[in-house]
Amino acid sequence: MDMKEQAEVMTPPKMELSLTINGANYELQVPPTKRLVTILREELNFTGTKISCEVGRCGACAVQMNNQLVNSCLVMAYQANHASIITIEGLSGEELDPIQRVFLEEGGFQCGYCTPGMMMAVHALLATNQAPSEEQIQEALSGNLCRCTGYGGIIRAVQKAISNNNQK
Amino acid sequence: MIRQGTTSLIDTCVWMPTSLEEAWDLKKKYGENAAFIAGGTLMQTHWAKGLNCPSHLISLDHMNEMKGWGEELVNGQTYTRLGAGITLDFCRQNKNLFHPLLVEAAKNIAAPAVRNRGTIGGNIANGFGDMIPALLAMDAFLTLYDGNSTHSLPLSDYIKTNNQSLIISVLVPEDQTKRFFYKKLCHREAFTPSVITVAGSFNLNEKRKLTAVRLALSGGSTHPQRLYESEQLLEGSTLTNNHLQKVYQVINEEFIPSTDPFSTATYKRLVASNWVVSEIARLAT
Ligand SMILES: Cc1cc2nc3c(=O)[nH]c(=O)nc-3n(C[C@H](O)[C@H](O)[C@H](O)COP(=O)(O)OP(=O)(O)OC[C@H]3O[C@@H](n4cnc5c(N)ncnc54)[C@H](O)[C@@H]3O)c2cc1C
Ligand code: FES
Ligand code: FES
């Protein structure tokens, strides 16, 4: 039995990758195992998504894929095929996203390297839970490491985003 | 190292079979040069550590049999069926669908972004996943495909052999009456691999005797184990301080953890014995 006639195969060096990023469609030819973070940063210039540990441990590369938070360093091209991706560049429109504003107001960052991933994690949390408890906030951000802030400003920023939401 | 690993991935072929037979035949055809892949969250960390990525990856993403969940009646007992492809976060978020012990175990694994990709099947098949002790404590069964047939096997038997079958689903008895505990010791509080993971469950009858006792342990480098002798000692017993001391000793003798660069086997045995005894005492009083 010739497998190639049976299962769909993504052969190296290239597959046709079709995905939506921040609402716009992209078609690319990439190796099926190329990581999403590399595609975003090096092929498409979405450099807001950062890269650090490269193995899912720091959250710097976090984006949303089909409305779920993922580490783009742990997603391979074939896994992102036909997916809808939101990166940090997709959060703001004409104005800053409310989450970006509270991070500015509350000192939620210093060097800013962890910030795009952190904001994507906060966005994913508030999209499913408008009034998370402190424990739920910590849990939602547990995969995002920050070397600068000591997390105090970040937690304050999230709490402000929640209270702003409640006042609406 | 990581860059090198990535470069080696450039030549990897990814297959997307849609049936168990097709997936199995591909594995047979490419042998050692092929591996099944689900979320890939664990495999990618292996490649980053320098392990070679096989030249053929057989994705389980399109395997309908591994999707979804439901109820199943087997020999008069109702089970919750979890497809092997269910993600850890789906399990964590659905308290209404899944047993609280499973939800608790899923909550203790990695962080949301990893849990959104990592699957239950991958957690069990890798042999060291933190879901395993919880599932052992619940007498879970696996539905497996071995190239010839689909059959079920208790997880407690699956962990004893190097079983290479495809995991299709996990069957967990729907038993809400059992008391249970789940604890994971780590080097820091959250988002870190396990030093040891302990899970247990039992019923307390009207005479306050323990029945259907299950104790299971594992850890980052410690193979999952059921503590059959300790379970036996607790089975049918009423708890007294003397009896708990005896149980403590037997756990200490029966549990065989590994020593790793951070923690000795002696330390792990000590923690395990303390945890099991104190959790049982807490839940039985
Ligand atoms: C940052 C980070 C933190 C982590 N923390 C934890 C943790 O705290 N606890 C923990 O347990 N794990 C942890 N993991 C490991 C991993 O995420 C989980 O074990 C996850 O459940 C693996 O699932 P997967 O679908 O990604 O498996 P994969 O990586 O796709 O596969 C793992 C293994 O299982 C095999 N396999 C997968 N599915 C099947 C199937 N259906 N049938 C047969 N074989 C199959 C594969 O061939 C491979 O050998 C962590 C990983 C990362 C990156
Ligand atoms: S770079 Fe992806 S999680 Fe660290
Ligand atoms: S602000 Fe510098 S790492 Fe978080």
Image (cartoon, grey):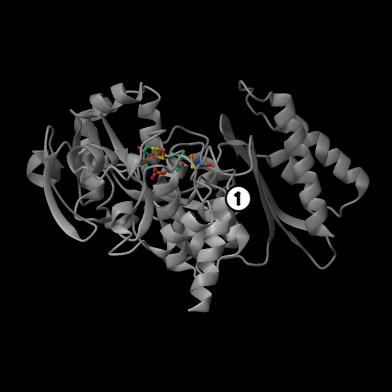
How many residues crowd around disc 1 within 10 Å: few (fewer than 14), some, or many (20 or more)? few
Residue at position x 35%, y 25% from top? B2
A74 and B64: which is toward the camera = A74
Q: Residue at x 77, y 32 (%)?
A: B270
The residue shown at (68%, 41%) is B228
Residue A139 falls left or right of residue B121: right
Look at the picture and state if A71 lies above or below A96: above
Residue B172 is situated, as x and y percent measured from the top left of the image, at: 52, 58
Q: Secondary structure at mark 1?
A: helix
- Report whether the residue tagged 1 is closer than 8 Å to ligand 3: no
Residue at 25 percent across and 47 percent down: it is A79
Task: List the single residue furthest toward the bottom.
Answer: A168
As drawn, is B238 to the left or to the right of B96? right
Name above or below for residue A127 compared with residue A142: below
Front residue of B226/A91: it is: A91
Residue type, label 1: Gly
Q: Is residue B160 visible?
A: yes
Q: Residue furthest front?
A: A105
Residue A99: % across, % down: 44, 61
Give the residue number, with chain letter if any, for mark 1: A152
